[in-house]
Every structure is written in C-alpha cells, then in structure tokens.
Amino acid sequence: MISITTQQWYAWITAFVWPFLRILGLMLSEPVLSNRSVPTSARVGLAIMVTLVVAPTLPPMPRVDPASAAGVFIAIQQLLIGLAMGFVMRIALTAAETAGQLGGLQMGLGFAVFFDPQSTAQTAVVGQFLGLFAMLLFLSMNGHALVISALAESFRVLPVAADPVNPIGWRVLAQWGGVIFTVGLLIALPVIAALLIANVAVGIMTRAAPQLNIFAVGFPVTLVTGFVALYLAIPYIGPALARLFEQAAGVMLRVAGALH
C-alpha cells in the first residue's frame, strides 16, 4: 500500500501554489492580460498552464507549512513580487499614454476626452491613441512572451524563500516610475516643438495684423500642425517604444534581483 506523508503533501502543494501566486500577480498587473476585456478565467487558466510548465524546473521550495503564518507570508510575498514585475511593464505603456496627453494638450485637444473603462477615468483622445499604438506594438514584438520569459528567469534571480525581500527592490521600482515623465516627454517632444513654432508664427501674425482673430486662426493651425507632426513622428516613435519595452523587461529582472 502506498502511503503519502503530510510533508509530501505540503511539498507538492507549495511547489505549485507559491510559483502560481507570483505568476498570477504578474498577470493581474501586466498591461495586456490585466485588461478588463480579458476574462478572469482566462487569466487564471493561463497562470495555471505557465505554472505547470515552470514549476518542475524550479529549485526546492522552503520546508514551511503552507497553512502556517510563515506559509501565508511567503504566499503574500510572492503575489506582491508578481504585481511589482507586471507593474514595471505597465509603467512603460503609461509613458506612451502620457506622451499622447502632453501632445494633445498642446494641440488644443485637452478637452477631447472620453471614459476609459480600463483606467476607469477620463482619458485624452491622443493619449488613448498612442496607448493603443503602444499596446499593438507590444503584441507585434511578442512582448507578452518577453514578459513571461522574464518572469520565468525571475525564479532563478529571486527564488521562493521564507526570508523577507530586500526593500531596495521597491526603491528600484519607484525610480523606474520616473520613466512615465522622461520618456513621455521625449516621445512628445517632436509634436511639442512643431506646435511651439506654429504658436510663435501665429503670434507674429497677430502682432503684424491686430485685427486678425487669433482664436479663429490659431486653433486650426495648431490642430493641423499637431496632427501632421504626429503623423511624421510615428515611424520614429515605434522603435523608441520597442527599446523601452526591451528595457522594461530588463528592469523586471533588476527589480527581482534587488528584492533578493
């Protein structure tokens, strides 16, 4: 008769549950899979499938009772690690949306907003356009596979352990948040520069002809200039976003390494 001890049951459970929580945490915060249009059952099913593939390659789990306080602590810690890694890629996508919001504000489309069910907030039209463009680019370059490979590599960089994580990792994540403003401004810079020139030209025209209605002339000029500048900048925005996503995959591992 085959007998299975309690320790063996615990070893089998922890070998699946703890990696599953890290993978599920990433899928809850990663920009594509966390979209409201993706059913929850699909996320959980994908997390289970990835865990079944990754779990046999992982080092032995800590010998801790999963129902004890230490086991619950490890489970919460793994979930937070996954959320942090997925949040790194979300920050990269938010940088593209910020660039669109900055450009749209300079174009005079700051009032053109609509409700975004993903962020449950009002979003500028140009920001939503660049956000969708970045997401399509992310999928076209197999960014989802890049994220999953970085997640699998994180188990080597940061194994599942009972020790608390290093708080330096959270500081690395916070520093990466500055990308929203730096990269967003750099992406929007061509549009902003073109609109600055257009506004200077409109100002000179108004100075030369005071009877000119600046509101009737300036708004169409800035609008057309902004759209033309955005159209011309799109071929250069794509490679910049691709490099940003590749850098974000490296930052995911750097956050995991700093948490060790």
Image (cartoon, helix red, strand yellow):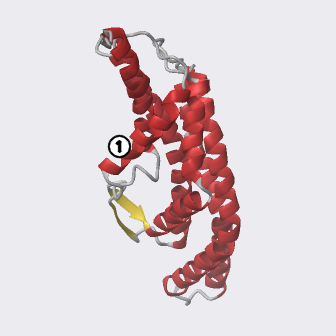
Residue at 68% x, 75% y: name it. Answer: 232
Element type where label 1 sits in the image: helix
Amino acid, disc 1? Val
Determine which quarter of the picture holds residue 116. bottom left
Determine which quarter of the picture holds residue 172. top right
> Residue 57: image x %, image y %?
56, 28
Residue at 46% x, 12% y: name it. Answer: 62
Placement of 140 over or under 20, stated as above or below: below
> Residue 61: image x %, image y %?
47, 17
> Residue 73: image x %, image y %?
36, 17
> Residue 64: image x %, image y %?
39, 10
Does residue 47 appear to the left or right of 184 in the view shown? left
Q: Nearer the viewer, residue 163 or 10?
A: 10
Determine which quarter of the picture holds residue 249. top right
Q: Which residue is mark 1?
A: 44
Q: Is residue 175 visible?
A: no
Q: Nearer the viewer, residue 71 or 194?
A: 71
Q: Residue furthest front?
A: 1
Q: Quadrant of the N terminus?
A: top left
Q: Nearer the viewer, residue 141 or 258?
A: 141
| Tally of numbered discs | 1
Q: Is residue 211 visible?
A: yes
Q: Quadrant of the C terminus?
A: top right
Placement of 187 over or under 20, stated as above or below: below
Does residue 163 appear to the left or right of 44 in the view shown? right
Residue at 64% x, 56% y: name it. Answer: 241
Q: Nearer the viewer, residue 91 or 245?
A: 245
Residue at 51% x, 34% y: name it. Answer: 54
* Other-residue count near label 1 (Cα within 10 Å), few / some / many at <14 / 14–19 / ≥20: some
